[in-house]
Image (cartoon, rainbow, N blue to C red):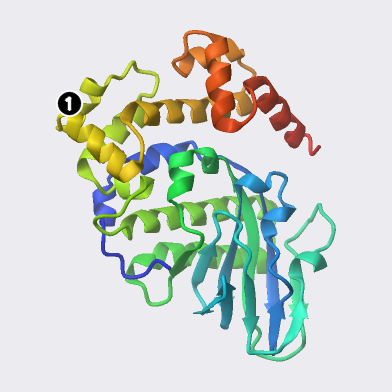
């Protein structure tokens, strides 16, 4: 849960920070939203994940937004009380349950959803009692989850409480707009909800960075390290440049050995390996979104031959570039 941040401040992020560079490449490739309104005593059935509904579950991130009322969350046997204004996301689709009270009836919202496509956001009501709990639920598919340094640093649960938080006005306003799109649907409401869902996830990431305490490890913690942040910023700003370790050490105002030690301690990798991973991630995006020749994409990724690129890409993503492109096109056709 993110509350009372103690690490880097929002002002320190700046207008040209590393997170901004990565988020410019965030591409929402699918989403689903529905409204869930149970009453009385209840619990969701089983611990199934919303991500199973996605075209590509490997990059699907389930989320819940508590709009009204309260309920509990059970994650790995630990219960947490949730209240209005709480926003939760599960980057790895971790199984969990929601409920109110004990011993209540079991309900399965995912199984009760109508067949797609939807003209309006489904609203699932359970019971006629007053004082219903109201949640906005769903998932988003986010290509940035394929970037290993980001993926590896995320927790199983991202949780922000907006009620009473002075720095959450903007997120509360976004949630209010989402509720209006559900309650008073207009033309383009589903598309608007998709964009608002994406914005909400980006805000969760920003809160995660802000909450990183000193001494943390991982990609988000690296953004709070001035030397690493400078180094990562130039990599993300100009990934096609022929960077060397001395170049990056000069940018970070550290010696080569000190920079290498900081990378290993915080990111568990070296500057050059990090650069290669970012280039390969960008290559995966280019294969998905463009018809450019694989040889040209390989060149942009810093590989002298297409064969070398194929080997590196296969090691990172499990399939060669041509198969990756074919799978992306198949998913785009709904197959």
- The answer to whether 185 is drawn above or below residue 151 in the figure is below
Q: Nearer the viewer, residue 59 or 31?
A: 59
Most extreme residue toward the top, as rendered?
A: 305
Number of residue marks: 1
Residue 261 x, y percent position in the rendering: 23, 37
Q: Residues within 10 Å of mark 1 (few under 14, many from 20)?
A: few
Q: Position of residue 34 (x, y in %)?
A: 70, 64
Per the image, the residue denoted by label 1 is: 250
Quarter residue 317 falls in: top right
In screen coordinates, is 278 left or right of 17? Answer: right
- In this orientation, which residue lies closer to the viewer: 75 or 129? 75
Vertical side of 320 occupied by 145: above or below? below
Q: Secondary structure at mark 1?
A: helix
Question: In the drawing, does residue 321 fall left or right of residue 334?
Answer: left
Q: Residue furthest right?
A: 115
Residue drawn at (35%, 41%), measured in percent from left and top? Answer: 268
Query: Can you say whether 224 is above or below 17 in the image?
Result: below
What residue is drawn where x is 64% and y is 56%?
Answer: 139
- On screen, residue 326 versus residue 299, left or right, reads right
Residue 184 appears in view = no
Where, by quadrant of the figure, is residue 216 drawn?
bottom left
Image quadrant holding the N terminus, namely bottom left
326 or 103, nearer to the observer: 103
Q: Quadrant of residue 326?
A: top right
| Residue 195 point in image, percent of width and height | 57, 50
Residue 269 showing in the rendered view: yes
* Residue 188 percent coordinates (x, y): 68, 51
Residue at position x 64%, y 23% from top?
320
Q: Quadrant of the C terminus?
A: top right
């Amino acid at each position: 849960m993110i509350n009372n941040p103690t690490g880097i401040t929002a002002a320190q992020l700046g207008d040209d920070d590393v997170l901004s560079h990565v988020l410019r490449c965030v591409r929402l490739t699918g989403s689903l939203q529905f409204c869930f309104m149970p009453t009385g005593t209840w619990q969701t059935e089983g611990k199934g994940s919303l991500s199973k509904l996605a075209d590509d579950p490997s990059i699907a991130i389930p989320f819940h937004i508590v709009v009204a009322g309260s309920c509990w969350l059970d994650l790995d046997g630990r219960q947490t009380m949730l209240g209005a204004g709480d926003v939760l996301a599960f980057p790895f689709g971790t199984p969990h349950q929601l409920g109110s009270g004990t011993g209540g009836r079991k309900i399965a919202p995912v199984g009760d959803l109508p067949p797609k496509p939807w003209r309006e956001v489904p609203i699932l009501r359970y019971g006629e009692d007053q004082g219903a709990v109201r949640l906005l639920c769903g998932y988003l598919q986010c290509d940035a989850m394929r970037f290993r340094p980001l993926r590896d640093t995320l927790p199983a649960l991202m949780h922000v409480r907006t009620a009473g938080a002075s720095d959450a006005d903007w997120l509360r306003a976004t949630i209010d707009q989402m509720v209006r799109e559900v309650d008073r649907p207009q033309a383009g409401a589903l598309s608007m909800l998709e964009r608002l869902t994406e914005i909400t996830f980006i805000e969760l990431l920003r809160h995660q960075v802000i909450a990183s305490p000193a001494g943390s490890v991982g990609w988000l913690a690296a953004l709070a390290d001035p030397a690493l942040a400078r180094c990562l910023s130039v990599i993300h700003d100009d990934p096609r440049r022929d960077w060397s370790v001395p170049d990056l050490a000069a940018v970070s105002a550290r010696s080569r050995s000190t920079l290498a030690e900081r990378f290993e301690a915080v990111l568990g990798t070296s500057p050059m390996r990090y650069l290669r991973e970012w280039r390969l991630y960008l290559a995966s995006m280019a294969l998905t979104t463009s018809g450019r020749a694989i040889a040209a994409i390989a060149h942009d990724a810093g590989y002298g031959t297409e064969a070398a690129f194929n080997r590196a890409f296969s090691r990172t993503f499990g399939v060669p570039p041509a198969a990756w492109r074919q799978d992306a096109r198949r998913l785009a056709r709904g197959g």
